Image (spheres, rainbow, N blue to C red):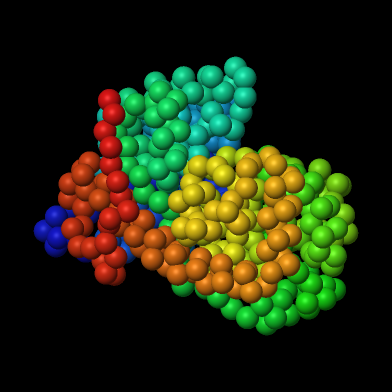
């Protein structure tokens, strides 16, 4: 996609908090594609973490927006800071990622600049009681200040609609970089990972990649793991990531569970795995299962938003389990570990499915269509031979 030589370069401001995990990767991928299209791109985010360095290396502008991950006493100051950034950048479109950035952006801008809000999973699903009701009421109110709400799955959109959030929706499934995530020899990859030096080469290996927090459900996986190792002696589990629950998870883990910590590149862990598991309590559409499948690995995931849309048709009976259900999770994991031929077949199916439906170029092209609809003046080329059919819109006012 290239700009018209006579037209101005569109200015995009991405605002992100959080800055790690899947949200950070989504923002980085969009920035890369938009810079390649000729746009002026700026990212406002906290100065810590990998996101600001990653997008700056791509050529994006970076504005340090020192915002906490959750709403708190500093919110008024954060909104004022964001207003200053918007005045200085003068964007044609503001794209807010996740609940906290969505809160601050919409209060700071209030629709005066075309605003795209991308929840990356709804905030009211992450909490309970009065806090959940406050979050839901805000999302209902704040929708009026979003020119478009971008959901990463039809299920995420349906959750918003059922909850009384009304606005103009676009559904754009998450995509991944197929060059960065691809199949590789299990034995060769394992030999290059120091943490696995003491693990037998033939030991069944399960990998879970995700922030160590309640959302990702590693505590449920550890509870299920007792039954898995009873049925599959010698199996090993690696938790890849870090987060607020790390200390608690380590304290309760048996010796067959290894902790890799945060990693810059998760691809070798997917490639080393016999099976990848993500037992989330809620999602919009998780990236980890898509990345694992791109590496040709079968996955077991929980039946949360985006799960059905992530899996190849027909894999649900073996690969989809209810959230917070250790017994069902243990059964699915053990069954696949005991059947290498089935794992291989599922992995091949998964790779084919992801390459045709979750290419990051498709995602970036669909987001560009949203921008074009809101501001015009965006490149009209399709780019890289990828069509835009994954972007679906519905209007509810």
Residue pictured at 40% horizontal, 23% vertical: 164
**Residue 365 visible from this viewpoint:** yes
Residue situated in front as seen by the camera: 23 or 341:
341
**Residue 18 visible from this viewpoint:** no
Residue pictured at 82% horizontal, 60% vertical: 231
**188, above or below 277, in the image:** below
Q: Position of residue 17 (x, y in %)?
A: 52, 41
Residue situated in front as seen by the camera: 229 or 385:
229
> For this view, does 382 lie left or right of residue 13?
left
Q: Position of residue 45 (x, y in %)?
A: 49, 44
Residue pictured at 53% horizontal, 32% vertical: 123
**150, above or below 74, in the image:** below
Q: Position of residue 97 (x, y in %)?
A: 45, 42
Quadrant of the image occupied by residue 209: bottom right
> For this view, does 247 lie left or right of residue 263?
right
Label tally = 0
Quadrant of the image occupied by residue 303: top right
> For this view, does 41 lie left or right of residue 183?
left
Residue situated in front as seen by the camera: 299 or 69:
299
The N terminus: image quadrant: bottom left
Q: Residue furthest top?
A: 130
The C terminus: image quadrant: top left
Q: Position of residue 70 (x, y in %)?
A: 58, 32
Residue pictured at 57% horizontal, 23% vertical: 132
């Amino acid at each position: 996609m290239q700009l018209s030589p006579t037209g101005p370069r569109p200015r995009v401001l991405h605002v992100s908090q959080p800055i790690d995990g899947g949200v950070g990767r989504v923002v980085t991928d969009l920035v890369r594609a938009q810079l390649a299209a000729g746009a002026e791109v700026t990212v406002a985010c906290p100065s810590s973490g990998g996101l600001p360095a990653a997008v700056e290396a791509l050529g994006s502008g970076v504005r340090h927006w020192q915002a906490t991950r959750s709403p708190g006493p500093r919110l008024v100051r954060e909104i004022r800071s964001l207003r200053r950034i918007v005045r200085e950048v003068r964007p044609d479109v503001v794209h807010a990622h996740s609940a906290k950035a969505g809160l601050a952006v919409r209060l700071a801008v209030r629709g005066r600049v075309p605003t795209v809000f991308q929840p990356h999973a709804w905030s009211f699903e992450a909490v309970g009681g009065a806090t959940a009701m406050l979050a839901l009421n805000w999302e209902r109110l704040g929708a009026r200040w979003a020119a478009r709400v971008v959901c990463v799955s039809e299920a995420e959109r349906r959750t918003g609609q059922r909850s009384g959030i009304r606005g103009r929706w676009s559904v754009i499934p998450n995509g991944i970089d197929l060059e960065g995530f691809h199949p590789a020899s299990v034995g060769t990859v394992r030999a290059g990972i120091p943490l696995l030096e003491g693990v037998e080469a033939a030991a069944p290996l399960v990998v879970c990649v995700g922030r160590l927090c309640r959302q990702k459900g590693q505590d449920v996986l550890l509870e299920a793991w007792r039954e898995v190792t009873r049925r599959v002696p010698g199996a090993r589990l690696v938790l890849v990531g870090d987060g607020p629950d790390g200390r608690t998870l380590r304290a309760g883990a048996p010796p067959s569970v290894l902790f890799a910590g945060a990693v810059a590149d998760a691809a070798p862990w997917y490639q080393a795995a016999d099976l990848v598991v993500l037992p989330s309590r809620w999602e919009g559409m998780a990236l980890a299962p898509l990345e694992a499948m791109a590496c040709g690995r079968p996955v077991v995931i929980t039946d949360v938003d985006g799960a059905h849309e992530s899996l190849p048709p027909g894999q649900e009976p073996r690969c989809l389990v209810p959230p917070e259900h250790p017994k069902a999770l243990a059964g699915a994991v053990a069954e696949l570990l005991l059947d290498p031929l089935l794992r291989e077949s599922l992995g091949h199916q998964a790779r084919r499915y992801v390459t045709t439906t979750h290419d990051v170029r498709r995602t970036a092209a669909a987001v560009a269509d949203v921008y074009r609809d809101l501001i015009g003046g965006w490149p009209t080329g399709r780019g890289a031979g990828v069509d835009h059919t994954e972007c679906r819109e519905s209007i509810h006012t």
